[in-house]
Amino acid sequence: MQKVGIIGGGLGGLASACVLGARGYEVVVFERNEWLGGKAAVLETNGFRFDMGPTILTLPAVLDRIFAEAGRHVARALDLVRLDPQWRSFFEDGSTLDLLADTDAMTSRLAAFSPGTGTAEGYRRFIGLSEQLHRISESYFFWRPVGGLRDMFDARATFQTSILRDVLAMRPGQSVAGTVRGQIPDSRVAQMVDHFTQYVGSAPDASPAVLCGIAHMQTCGGVWYPVGGTYAVPAALTNLAESLGVEFRCGARVEKILISQGVVHGVRLKGGETVGVDALVSNSDSVRTHRELLDGLPARAFERRRRYEPACSGVVLYLGLKQRYEHLLHHNFVFSCDPNEEFDAIYRKGRPAPDPTCYVCAPSGTEPDVAPPGGEALYVLVHTPYLRPGHDWPRMLPAYRRIILEKLKRTAGMEDIESRIVIEHSLTPDDINRRYHVLNGAIYGLASHGRFLGAFKPSNRSPDVRGLYLAGGAAHPGPGMPMVLMSGWIAADSLDQDFGSGTGIAKARPEKNNA
Ligand SMILES: Cc1cc2nc3c(=O)[nH]c(=O)nc-3n(C[C@H](O)[C@H](O)[C@H](O)COP(=O)(O)OP(=O)(O)OC[C@H]3O[C@@H](n4cnc5c(N)ncnc54)[C@H](O)[C@@H]3O)c2cc1C
């Protein structure tokens, strides 16, 4: 049996561990923190429970596929509750709009929200386009180790009419913002719809139109809440991996990937211990993997391939409230007055937006146990620029916290929020950088900027080092829970193609417990 090391126990690393464990490899996960799950961490304090990172779970089909590798059903490991309406949107003019999963119902809602503007019909057309882009992603981009256009299309088949049609349907050269605004005249609805690019921490006017497919992925696949909070997802994956014999070493920081003649043969841990492996999956940020864990030729080849721009970072306030707000849904977006000014500040000027969009998660309606009776474990996330020289968040946070709370008071009807707060914690870009060891505090790996090639990330199979595979938000297919889980699957599958049977058929392994 071959031995595989996994650097990092984030969702991508855990997904790889499960797939490789199911396919019969001896797997050891090295995680520098004392917990598994990476950004999908949990904060429990004074009777409140907060998800610290991701809260919006989409595309649970990816989890199904990972559990199916081991012949298990995700429904036995996770209790997923579907949320519909998916979000409530609050706009500066006092209007509110719920995003509904069903396109017909949403179209009717929009006809009443923005009568006579063509917005309802425009939304329907947009979802049709989004569905087409989603289908193209499923056919050419997902579930395979893509690193660029050439990996998507077989060169011999590229001139087939159907493939050329798909290439053109991807709207090369067009942006998300332009595509959305070409269909949806109401500026509030357009702002809500192009906010899907915030799932990948990128500016809608700089991101390729193909990312419009995210809208259909969410409306069609649903928004889900794992009972117990997002942390239930890494916990379920850890149980599954342990039942497949995966070894976890927490508090074990990899300091070097050992290679000889271009082939991986081990890792060196902080403290000097070396561990021999036949292959490695790095779930550490792909750029930092190359800059810090590798040196010499492979690191230089990676740097030459393209310019790596971090995605945005963020500030999160975890507010324990003694009384919940009844007018909030589980997921809420409190939109900025001017998305151009907001995205210009975050993505071009590198400054926190003066009037930010706040994402507000109020989970107590779905799971009352997150707070003491009648209370709320309110989570407020605002996107900020990735860390630049001169950003001093311990100094900047108090003033920015005031801006965030004023926004919630003014635009989301939460005028008395300060009097309801009984406990408060925060997460800044500095904290994100330190806790998760990412590139410049980026929440979502690498930015998807570039109207032609912005969607491409480093391939899951390293072209520079034999036996090295990449999983996580800064590798293909990109950030967000479903995508990093998929990246973990792709990295493991590519490894198995190279080292094993590559059949994808789980080998029989004794179960240690019932995951
Ligand atoms: C505040 C916030 C809100 C978010 N909201 C959402 C959301 O609502 N929905 C959504 O889908 N996504 C959301 N995301 C994004 C999502 O959390 C990430 O895309 C995903 O969790 C990243 O997973 P990953 O596999 O890239 O690993 P990470 O979570 O980045 O974990 C990588 C792990 O590798 C470890 N590591 C790194 N280097 C080493 C080393 N040298 N040795 C050992 N271990 C190492 C790190 O300690 C870490 O545990 C959010 C993220 C944040 C921070």
Image (cartoon, rainbow, N blue to C red):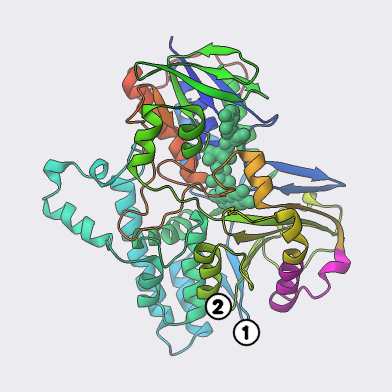
Figure quadrant of residue 175: bottom left
Q: Which mark is residue 338?
A: 2
Q: Which residue is mark 1?
A: 93
Is residue 460 highlighted in magenta?
Answer: no
Front residue (pair 136, 515)? 136
What main secondary structure does the magenta stretch of the protein show?
Answer: helix
Callout 1: 10 Å neighbours few (<14), some, many (20+)? few
Q: Is residue 355 left or right of residue 468?
A: right
* Residue range corresponding to the magenta coloring: 402-420
Q: Residue shown at 67%/65% (left/top)? A: 329
Please indicate whether residue 198 sits to the left or right of residue 181 in the image.
Answer: right
Quadrant in the picture for the C terminus: top right
The CA distance from mark 1 to mark 2 is 12 Å
**Residue 26 placement (x, y as % from top left):** 50, 14
- Image height check: is 57 above or below 418? above
**Residue 45 place in picture, x, y as percent:** 83, 45
Q: Secondary structure at mark 1?
A: loop
Residue 117, image quadrant: bottom left
